[in-house]
Amino acid sequence: QVQLVESGGGLVQAGGSLRLSCAASESIFSIGVMGWYRQAPGKQRDLVATMTTGGSTNYADSVKGRFTISRDNAKNTVYLQMNNLKPEDTAVYYCNGRRTSVRTYVYWGQGTQVTVSS
């Protein structure tokens, strides 16, 4: 079973920056698509950003131009650089891995809290 461990969350003022990291227990290249999702209190878990092994990215409209996803396959780590943070970015952020072969396997981290104060 793949394990994903997030780190880097915390409390930051609006306009500040944070970088989240997600360390995987096995090769993220072999996993495939890696991404970040977030869940605010009382809301559903939503996509933030994804990145394929080829480097193609997809972002939620609300974070475009402010967040950047990247991956280091050699370190089996995925990052989310978050700039110009807003109070509405406050949520638990989850790392996600999606492996597609004969069937699709989805992996989740335990989440890391990001709180943006106004």
Image (cartoon, grey):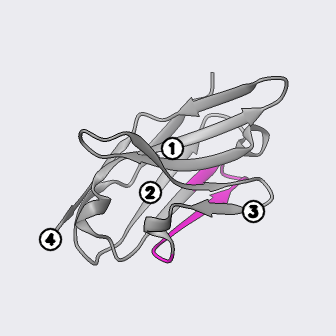
The numbered mark, 1 or 2, whose residue comes first in the sequence reads 2
Residue type at mark 1: give it.
Cys
In the image, residue 81 sits, relative to residue 48, either above or below, namely below
Give the residue at x 24% y 38%: 42
Indicate yes or no whether the magenta region holds residue 84. Answer: no
> Would you name the residue on which mark 2 appears?
20
Is there a contact, CB below 8 Å, between mark 3 and mark 1?
A: no
Closer to the observer: label 2 or label 3? 3
Residue type at mark 2: give it.
Leu
Dot label at residue 55: 3
Is there a contact, CB below 8 Å, between mark 2 and mark 3?
A: no
> Would you name the residue on which mark 4 appears?
118
Query: Few, some or many C-alpha atoms within 10 Å of disc 4 (few <14, some 14-19, many ≥20)?
Result: few
Give percent across and percent down for residue 47.
50, 50
Mark 2 and mark 3: Cα distance apart in space:
18 Å
Give the residue at x 58% y 31%: 107
Closer to the observer: label 4 or label 2? 4
The numbered mark, 1 or 4, whose residue comes first in the sequence reads 1
Closer to the observer: label 1 or label 4? 4
Mark 3 and mark 1: Cα distance apart in space:
17 Å
Residue type at mark 4: give it.
Ser
Give percent across and percent down for residue 4.
53, 36
Is there a contact, CB below 8 Å, between mark 4 and mark 2?
A: no
Residue type at mark 3: give it.
Gly
Q: Element at badge 2?
A: strand
Query: Few, some or many C-alpha atoms within 10 Å of disc 1 (few <14, some 14-19, many ≥20)?
Result: many
- The stretch in magenta equals 65-78
Mark 4 and mark 2: Cα distance apart in space:
20 Å
